[in-house]
Amino acid sequence: MSAGTAAAGASGQDARHGKISPGEIAIGVIIGRTSEFFDFFVYAIASVLVFPKVVFPFVDPLTGTLYSFAIFALAFVARPIGSLIFMAVDRAYGRGIKLTIALFLLGGSTAAIAFLPGYETVGMASAVLLALFRIGQGLALGGAWDGLASLLALNAPEKRRGWYAMIPQLGAPLGLMVASALFAYFVYALPAADFLGWGWRYPFFVAFAINVVALFARLRIVVTPEYERLFETRDLQPAPVMDTVRQEGRTIVIGAFAPLASFALFHMVTVFPLSWVFLFTEEGPYRFLLIEVIAAAFGVLAIIASGLIADKVGRRTLLGFSAAAIAAYSGFAPQLLDAGELGELAFMVLGFILLGLAFGQSSGAVSSSFSPTHRYTGSALTSDLAWLVGAGFAPLVALLLSANFGLISAGAYLLSGAICTLLALWINKGLAGSMN
């Protein structure tokens, strides 16, 4: 089906529906974000359970996991470059073409990992190929920015902006729940040799299929004439990246640091604890993957609650309060990972509740702070920078610190993110005013 055919069909549906509502935009946002986060977590879980043994069997498990996390970070380094490339595609050929290329690159890179040969077959070429595929994922994620989150925030009713701001963030716990449950099934159902031989590859095939579904679901929205007009009237059009950086550099940097506490916590309760439990306890991964599913469900509820709370007290107040709570959490919670099953469950559930409250309001927090001309590109660059600084290296740094200095050092790393958020909220008076 061509983009033109999709546009025609969707346009007719829009005509039947009448005026486009925030609810319709929200559906596209949730589908898109869930598919992206599912890809994200499938790779993250494999970085702990699979790649150290398949790609790096020549080193000890800790070193192999650190190598895997280093490759994991490459996507976050490549993501801003992807934004640079695909913004040019957007300006030249349109949002639909950009999104199609980006999501096929994302799905293709993910599916390619499913066919990755191990070290025993091709030697170090296995690590090189994994790094190239991971860079492909990062470039694609930069191009997958569709502007729907900003469009949703700008079209939300004035007194419900917090509610609509949390909707894109639901994709994170939903994606984790599906990815963790899928890996838990294969870990439980297969002998270790079969899981490492072929079982781990199936979640990557599923990720490709989900990307194809998400592509058509999002194209059905973004390429329709009604939505194109809505993007134009809301000034959500791509601007040159370098010009945006020159004009809006301060807003981009402050906007990236404002949600740093939640982005640092994001990996501290998703990727890092799985690696710690797998490497430094006697338990297998199956039970902890189920704990992740349970904790992520609490995260969904907390994200929903963040929308209600933000509309009552203001987004800046909630971000500041949650950053302070994350700072307190960092002082005691990581040690719970060494306190047995109940300690692990407490660490995960409490962490996901705090993550939901903070992460739930990090989407679109600076959209209205940008000038109309640079809002679309500026929001994309802010997101890229926030993920790079706050999350890209978090699993690597947290595991490296914890392995050498104990779990208390991982808490110190998380504390630094909370401090950065509080400083960013204090410094940026203009942003503070726009988020209230």
Image (spheres, rainbow, N blue to C red):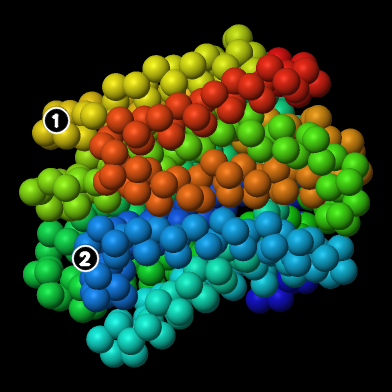
In the depicted view, which residue is nearer to us: 155 or 6? 155
- Residue 217, image x, y percentages: 60, 58
Q: Would you say 152 lies left or right of 122 here? A: right
Amino acid type at mark 1: Ala
Examine the rendered structure and indicate whether residue 342 appears above or below residue 207. above
Find disc 2 in the rendering and name its residue.
60
Residue at 41% over, 43% down: 267
- Residue 307, image x, y percentages: 55, 23
Badge 1 marks a residue whose secondary structure is loop
Between disc 2 and disc 1, whose residue precedes?
2
Examine the rendered structure and indicate whether residue 204 appears above or below residue 33. below
Residue 189 shows which numbered tag? none
Residue at 35% over, 58% down: 66
Q: Would you say 314 lies left or right of 98 here? A: left
Which residue of the protein is positioned furthest toward the top in this rendering? 313
User: Picture quarter containing residue 410?
Assistant: top left
Q: CA distance from mark 2 to mark 1?
A: 25 Å
In the depicted view, which residue is nearer to us: 241 or 306? 241
Examine the rendered structure and indicate whether residue 17 appears above or below residue 86. above
- Residue 388, image x, y percentages: 58, 49
Amino acid type at mark 2: Asp
Residue 339 shows which numbered tag? 1
